[in-house]
Amino acid sequence: MAAIKRISNAVWKGTGLEGSGTLSSTSGVLNETPYSFAARFVSEDGKAGTNPEELIGAAHAGCFSMALSFQLTGAGFPPTQLATKATVEMEKGDAGFRVSAIKLAVEGTVPGISEEKFLELAGVAKANCPISQALAAVPITLDAKLV
């Protein structure tokens, strides 16, 4: 199988503090979506646009959920629903800002599975989803619950 390629584009205009930019993707999900310093560091409500950390969180939550679904289905426990929240934390250090932690929290509706088996398979999914692997330099925690 040939390598899978996904393409996104960023256009930034102006200074880091006062400038702004747009993000676009081939799928069109991002279509000149605005981002800026304010969207990244000031506006918690998201009304000023998106930011790279939010997009990392969305990618990680989506990848992990799909990986967990594959793990559960492969073990004979197809899920009814998996709801994953990824919280990406950023801290300012001497060298500037860095992503310091990612917290995954999943609530799963999975008929017939024990809590122990669910936790085991969630751990496997966390370790093996491609986005978790790409973000391996960042501490990633997991809180998994059956509902």
Image (cartoon, helix red, strand yellow):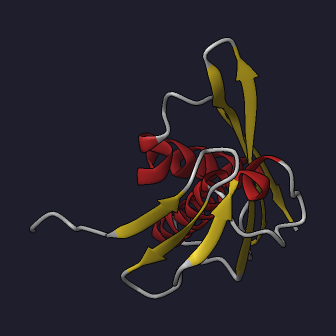
Q: Residue at x 15, y 63 (%)?
A: 3
Q: Nearer the viewer, residue 80 or 44?
A: 44
Furthest residue toward top: 94
Picture layout, residue 107 above or below residue 38: below
Q: Is residue 129 visible?
A: no
Residue that sits furthest to the left in the current view: 2
The foreground one among 137 and 90 is 90
State the count of labels: 0
Residue drawn where x is 9% and y is 67% of the image = 2
Q: Quadrant of residue 74?
A: bottom left
Q: Residue 1, image x and y in percent? A: 10, 68
Residue name at image x 50 percent, y 45 percent: 132
**Screen quadrant of the C terminus:** bottom right
**Residue at the image position 39 percent from the left and 68 percent from the top:** 9
Name the spot of residue 42 as percent of width and height, x first.
86, 50
Q: Compare residues 47 and 138 and report the one nearer the observer.
A: 47
Residue 106 position, x and y percent, is 76, 59
Residue 144 locus on image (x, y percent): 77, 51
